[in-house]
Amino acid sequence: MFHSLRKIFLTGKSARQTDQLTRRFRLTQRQIILGVLTLLLICGLQAYRAEMAVGQRATLYWGSTGSDVRLLQSKLSNWGYYKGNIDGVFGPDTARAVREFQRKNGLVADGIVGPATWAALGYSTTSGVQTVSVSSKGVSQSDDVELLARAITGEARGESYIGQVAVAAVILNRVEDPRFPNTIAGVIYQPGAFTAVADGQINLQPTESARRAAIDALNGWDPTYGSVYYYNPAKATSAWIWSRPRTITIGRHVFAN
């Protein structure tokens, strides 16, 4: 009798323990699932915020700070608009440079860098994606980038990147000079103007660096300080070209006016 009661008691105790263990296991299981779901939600929110941060360029103005300001300052510095430190702080020097750039590119000179100004700088409002931007030269952009890139490839594909931009800048400076045709095509195909046209190298497939150089030149970068001529002193035989006032030498080319 005693053994039977003891067996029942132990069996009931074991059942209660099993039930408690089961409840604890289920509770732990729910906690694990809840923890995993919470972690996934946090990761998803962080990824979304990162995507939004990458997917949009901020509108910049006096007082803005950060990486987009450094990108802006670097671009304007490369093109000669900005002379200050690349410090990521949008101050008076940056504002003046932005307004000057906007005026030259036919934008509202308000010193605020919004979508239109980002596009003129060669960037879309999506971070890290460079686009063909608005030209300050009064010409059709879609065809001119390609034609300008072909001229760069034919005339300067062996030059450094800045040397390629410089050749493009000379072409664009001629567009604005009343002594030359007022279109990019007119300047490039002016009889006797460029060797690449005479020997057929204008028809070569343009390189990617030539396309980038064309975009940078169209956006205002002029390493030649307004030059309208260039020549290779190792090859030039014209006494007249040697008589032109020199502005700068970049690679194998002398730039002049």
Image (cartoon, grey):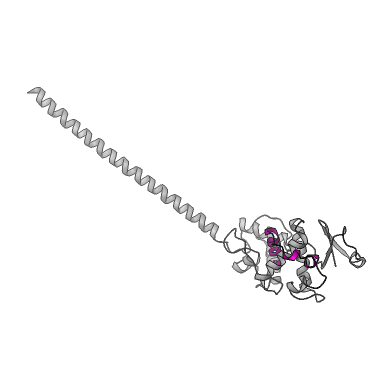
Residue 137: percent from left, percent from top: 72, 72
- Residue 26 occupies which quadrant of the picture? top left
Residue 220 makes an appearance in the image: no
Q: Is residue 151 magenta?
A: no
Residue 147: percent from left, percent from top: 70, 68
In the image, 197 versus 22, the foreground residue is 197
- Residue 97 occupies which quadrant of the picture? bottom right
Q: Residue at x 48, y 55 (%)?
A: 48
In the image, 160 versus 83, the foreground residue is 160
Residue 18 makes an appearance in the image: yes
Quadrant where the image shows the N terminus? top left
Q: Is residue 217 magenta?
A: yes
Prevailing secondary structure of the magenta residues: helix
Residue furthest to the left: 1
The magenta span reads 193-219
* Left or right of residue 45, residue 177 in this image: right
Q: Residue at x 13, y 25 (%)?
A: 6
- Residue 216 occupies which quadrant of the picture? bottom right
Quick check: 132 above or below 18?
below
Residue 34: percent from left, percent from top: 35, 46
Q: How many labels sit on residues?
A: 0
Quick check: 24 above or below 58?
above
Residue 249: percent from left, percent from top: 83, 58
Quadrant where the image shows the C terminus? bottom right
* Left or right of residue 9, residue 129 in this image: right
In the image, 80 versus 250, the foreground residue is 250
